[in-house]
Amino acid sequence: MNEKLFAPIYKLFDDAKNPYSIKDIAKSLNLPYSIAKQRLHKLEKIKKINRMKRGYYCNPSLIFKYNQTSSPSGAIYFINASARIMSGSNGIWITIYNSGFGEKVNNQYCTITYLKDNRFVIRPSNRFVGNKLYLLKCRSLALPISRKRLPDQILSKLSNKCSVIKIGIYLNDWGISVKDLFSTESKEEGELAEELEKLGSIEKKDKFNNLKADILFIKKNKKIPIEITNTNPFSKGKLKNSRRSGVKSSLIFERLYFFIKWNILYGSPTCLILNENWKNLSWLEKELNFVKNYKCNILFTDFEKGWAKPIAQEINRLIE
């Protein structure tokens, strides 16, 4: 190997603060692209430099620096996601279902680590070693990765159909708040989650025996599913009054049914938060005492500024 040909490249990598691409080397040394590529490949073959993602190369002594991440801090939250094999590709497509998180981290890079039981954690990274996050039109977040990043026990279950997984994030890593994370469907969910976190643990919505909860409040080994409905029974709309009232009432009954089922299965209380105007409906007033027998609690509020703190305290008292 002619050392004179490669000495300028050595010098560049010794002084480099960031990895170089073939294009960078060609431009810096005034070389044709094909010649720069040939020399970089030669240096990689004899392990004088390391090849990274997207055609970047670096000094082997600095590879640890580019892969290094700080120790995580703060609580970890798991978000609903799915994974599937990309058609006509060896890649894996992960979709993360949280618009609040997606809007904050769009076009950033991350590394992904497998934990267990279909659970992963993503940490912020850089473009040299990480995978890019893309915000989709549906406001979900896309993360395409190589098969090599997933363990065999996960790959064996994947197909071109979606498999349910969980993605864990440390909020401090991404500069996102609990309020941002839980405000995907309504701002009220984020406001209440922010207050409940001060009193116990919370989880993003999930499904248990077909029960969908906006928030799960966890304390003393008990989980309280919480649903928030800020619809007003007397608000105007396209439907006739009788039809509109019937639709909204059916939604209330549906929630109460699943809450009764939850209490029978798990023995813990549940909580439905409604606009205070629902108090004026006589049929709901009659149901209040009945559902209390199953620890189904209906709380009323005006959803005005500061509403979340007293409601969170009432929920907390259900366990204490």
Image: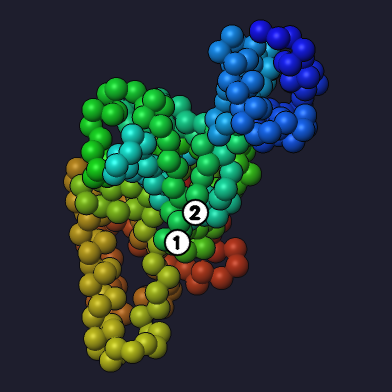
The residue under label 2 is which amino acid type? Answer: Leu
Label 1 crowd bin: few (<14), some (14–19), many (20+), radius 10 Å: few
Quadrant into which the C terminus falls = top left
Marks 1 and 2 sit apart, C-alpha to C-alpha, by 7 Å
Q: Residue at x 52, y 31 (%)?
A: 111
Name the residue beneath numbered marker 2.
135
Q: Quadrant of residue 299?
A: bottom left
Name the residue beneath numbered marker 1.
137
Question: Horizontal placement of 213 versus 35: left or right?
Answer: left
Question: Horizontal placement of 320 versus 63: left or right?
Answer: left
Q: Residue at x 78, y 19 (%)?
A: 8
Question: Horizontal placement of 108 versus 220: left or right?
Answer: right
User: How many badges with numbers are in the image?
Assistant: 2
Q: Residue at x 56, y 50 (%)?
A: 106
Query: What is the x, y in percent for residue 33?
Result: 65, 34
Q: Residue lying farthest bottom?
A: 240
Q: Is residue 265 above or below residue 309?
A: above
Q: Residue at x 29, y 76 (%)?
A: 248
> Viewer-proximal residue, 226 or 69?
69
The residue under label 1 is which amino acid type? Answer: Lys
Q: How is the image coloured?
A: rainbow
> Viewer-proximal residue, 69 or 253?
69
Label 2 crowd bin: few (<14), some (14–19), many (20+), radius 10 Å: many
Tag 1 secondary structure: loop
